């Protein structure tokens, strides 16, 4: 099986979600199914169909989370600003064209969340910066192919904001 690269915080979120699904949502959907069955004719019972669909979703998500947790490999978030970009690294990317700066943490795909500044090591930007030096004095410039075209970013240390 493939390893799931994840931070300790990300693993905790996955285990919390798994516990919620198993101890709360699974029980609630089971109760909904029992109530729908009590209503009688299942062939035209939309409550029953909805509950069964939700049950299938929950069981699928439980299996997915169990697989990710079983194959989890913990990565440490790094504050080291004189290193190379790796999993757990925090960096600031400066758009060469606009000068806009974006702070990111590079994480595995299991916990990637661009809206919360966590980019996957497999995303176009994550893959482009992985392994590059982080230096305020001699910043590396990377070119990233995106659907919007070619973008260039300067890699800066996390304290460069």
Image: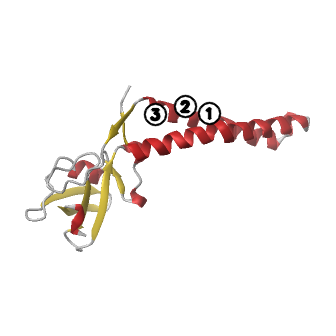
Residue 45 x/y as whole percent: 84, 40
Mark 3 or 2, nearer chain start: 2
**Number of the label disc, if any, that sits on residue 51:** none
Viewport quadrant of the N terminus: top left
- In the displayed orientation, state which residue is furthest to the top: 1
- In this figure, which residue is indicated by the disc labeled 1? 59
Instruction: Give x and y (percent) for residue 79.
Output: 24, 54
Label 3 secondary element: helix
| Vertical placement of residue 115 versus 17, above or below | below
Which quadrant of the rendered structure holds the C terminus?
bottom left
Residues 152 and 135: in front is 135
Asked which quadrant contains residue 103, the reply is bottom left
* Residue assigned mark 2: 63
Please give the residue where the numbered disc 3 appears in the rendered image: 69
State the CA–CA distance, disc 3 to disc 2.
10 Å
| Mark 1 neighbour density, 10 Å: few (under 14) some (14–19) many (20 or more) | some
Q: Earlier in the sequence, mark 3 or mark 1?
A: 1
Q: Is residue 50 above or below residue 97?
A: above
Image quadrant assignment for residue 46? top right
User: Which residue is located at x 17 percent, y 47 percent?
Assistant: 131
Q: Dot 3: few (<14), some (14–19), or many (≥20) neighbours within 10 Å?
A: some
Give the structural element (helix, strand or loop) at label 2: helix
Question: Does the CB distance between marks 1 and 2 fall below 8 Å?
Answer: yes
In this view, the residue in front, 71 or 56, is 71
Left/right of residue 59 with respect to residue 5 in the rendered view: right
What is the x, y in percent for residue 145?
25, 55
Label 2 CA crowd tier, 10 Å (few <14, some 14–19, many 20+) = few
Q: How far apart in space, not on screen, are marks 1 and 2 (Cα)?
A: 6 Å
Residue at screen point 27% across, 72% down:
100
Question: In front here: 18 or 55?
Answer: 18
């Amino acid at each position: 099986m493939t390893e799931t690269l994840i931070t300790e915080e990300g693993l905790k979120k996955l285990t919390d979600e798994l516990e919620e699904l198993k101890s709360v949502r699974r029980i609630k959907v089971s109760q909904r199914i029992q109530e729908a069955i009590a209503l009688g004719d299942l062939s035209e019972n939309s409550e029953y169909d909805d509950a069964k669909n939700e049950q299938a979703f929950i069981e699928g998500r439980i299996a997915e989370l169990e697989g990710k947790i079983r194959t989890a490999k913990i990565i440490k978030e790094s504050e080291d600003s004189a290193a190379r970009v790796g999993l757990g690294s925090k960096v600031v990317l400066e758009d060469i064209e606009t000068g806009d700066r974006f702070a990111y943490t590079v994480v595995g795909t299991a916990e990637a969340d661009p809206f919360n500044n966590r980019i996957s090591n497999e995303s176009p930007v994550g893959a482009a910066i992985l392994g590059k030096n982080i230096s305020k004095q001699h910043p590396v410039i990377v070119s990233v192919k995106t659907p919007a075209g070619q973008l260039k970013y300067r890699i800066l240390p996390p304290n460069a904001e």
